Amino acid sequence: MFVIVASKGRFEWISGIFQAEEVALHYMEQIHEELKEYQSLIHVEGMSYPFYIIESQGYFQFLTKDEVIGLFNHTDVSEDEDEVHFNIYTVDSDYRPKKPGTDYMGMLHHDHVTNEFIAKYKEEGTEILVKRRIF
């Protein structure tokens, strides 16, 4: 999997996700000059669709279904009732914003994993992930 990650100051986003490197490189050529310097193409080995992006504290992790289950199993409800532990994005096909290089990650199916979400996971297990269309 080939992922275009952008970083500008304290802001990070994913500008594109592609199964084929040549498609990712062609897409990068379309990024406007003012945004190009912030973009990096990374190769995430061994990943195929569907996979999951975990966004936490401004960083991205790319996980398989089994790794997501492990993450949920090891995440506990915290004392801060408003805490968002992480955001989880489900990626099941190539992702490319209409304006290359920009942050449209909100278009990806995603969920904010809060204490309430973790509590439901502890009760229902992976069924909550199916209900929320993560799996």
Image: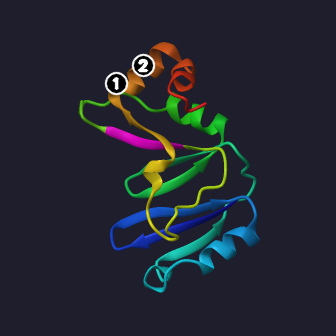
Q: Amino acid at mark 1?
A: Glu
Do tag 2 and tag 1 residues touch (Cβ < 8 Å)?
Answer: yes
Q: Position of residue 124 (x, y in %)?
A: 50, 14
Q: Position of residue 49 (x, y in %)?
A: 71, 46
SS type, badge 2 = helix
Q: Position of residue 93 (x, y in %)?
A: 67, 49
Q: CA distance from mark 2 to mark 1?
A: 6 Å
Is 128 left or right of 12, judged from the image as shown? right
Q: Residues within 10 Å of mark 1 (few under 14, many from 20)?
A: some
Q: Amino acid at mark 2?
A: Lys
SS type, badge 1 = helix
Residue 88 inside the magenta-drawn segment: yes
Q: Residue furthest front?
A: 98
Image color mode = rainbow
Q: Residues within 10 Å of mark 2 (few under 14, many from 20)?
A: some
| Above or below for 44 versus 10 | above
Q: Nearer the viewer, residue 120 or 21?
A: 21
Is 98 left or right of 116, judged from the image as shown? right
Q: Residue at x 43, y 50 (%)?
A: 106
Residue 117 inside the magenta-drawn segment: no
Q: Residue at x 57, y 24 (%)?
A: 130
Is 111 left or right of 133, judged from the image as shown? left
- Residue beneath label 1, please? 116
Please state, as top left, top right, bottom left or bottom right, where the C terminus lies in the image: top right
Magenta part of the protein: which range? 84-89
| Above or below for 92 versus 15 | above
Q: Main secondary structure of the magenta part?
A: strand
Please state, as top left, top right, bottom left or bottom right, where the N terminus lies in the image: bottom right
Q: Residue at x 33, y 39 (%)?
A: 84
Q: Residue furthest bottom?
A: 33
- Residue beneath label 2, please? 120
